[in-house]
Image (tube, coloured by chain):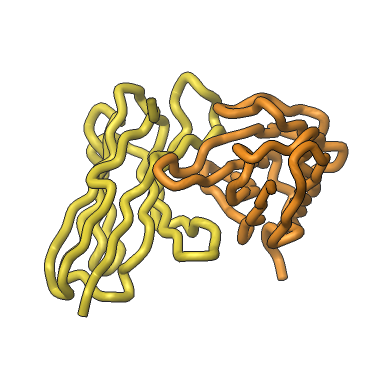
Amino acid sequence: DAGITQSPRYKITETGRQVTLMCHQTWSHSYMFWYRQDLGHGLRLIYYSAAADITDKGEVPDGYVVSRSKTENFPLTLESATRSQTSVYFCASSFREKGFFGQGTRLTVV
Amino acid sequence: TQLLEQSPQFLSIQEGENLTVYCNSSSVFSSLQWYRQEPGEGPVLLVTVVTGGEVKKLKRLTFQFGDARKDSSLHITAAQPGDTGLYLCAGPPISGGYNKLIFGAGTRLAVHP
């Protein structure tokens, strides 16, 4: 099906480990985003990308790394996971100021 | 501090009641969007308002964009249990880039039969 696909849907990892969350879009939207969603904070922007090889920090980028070698993929890496990074992560694309979201990855850091 | 402040944070009402949720900012937005999110799913776009003063209707939902493009409201008439969910406003601030979507914290609505 067309849209945003995130993988995995659920992930448990240990403190200090590196973990990568994958995001793939079947369109060719230029803009892609990573958000984290926590109770009381809504969706907070981690990183975004305006095109392949162009990325920029959002509101809460510390501890995260992104890359965008191809337009359709936008992986998010936690370099050394911490408990405070336990959250639900959403990938999104944007076209004509409309956002399209994946189903999310629920990450638990123990 | 959120760039977009939503109120109320929680709303619990009976079926058939009317309600309004608000989305306010001190910044100007080129547009504002409203999303609805259900448990375990990503947000789904309901509407985008672009012009200051614009009013859009989607069945029982009425969306308004403030004249100064700093605030928006969502009014639901005769709420139904199927309206239950998290309502999020979002937008690209004028100063932040055309497509950079910033979200409010959301209003969690529960409609009881």
In the visual, does A20 lie left or right of A58? right
Question: For residue A85, which quarter of the picture?
Answer: top right
In the visual, does A72 lie left or right of A62? right
In the visual, does A109 lie left or right of B67? right
Instruction: Tell me if residue B99 can be seen.
Output: no
**Drawn colour of chain A?**
orange
- The residue depicted at 68 percent of the width and 25 percent of the height is A56
Q: Nearer the viewer, residue A48 or A62?
A: A62
Q: Position of residue B59 (x, y in %)?
A: 27, 68
| Outermost residue, left side | B17
Instruction: Tell me if residue A25 can be seen.
Output: yes
In the visual, does A12 lie left or right of B60? right
Q: Position of residue B103 (x, y in %)?
A: 44, 39
Q: Position of residue B71 (x, y in %)?
A: 27, 35
Q: Nearer the viewer, residue A33 or A109?
A: A109
Q: Position of residue B94 (x, y in %)?
A: 44, 23
Question: For residue A64, which quarter of the picture?
Answer: top right
- The residue depicted at 47 percent of the width and 65 percent of the height is B39
Q: Nearer the viewer, residue A64 or B29?
A: A64
| Outermost residue, right side | A69
Q: Nearer the viewer, residue A68 or A21?
A: A21
Quarter of the image for the N terminus of chain A: give it: bottom right
**Drawn colour of chain B?**
yellow
- The residue depicted at 49 percent of the width and 59 percent of the height is B44
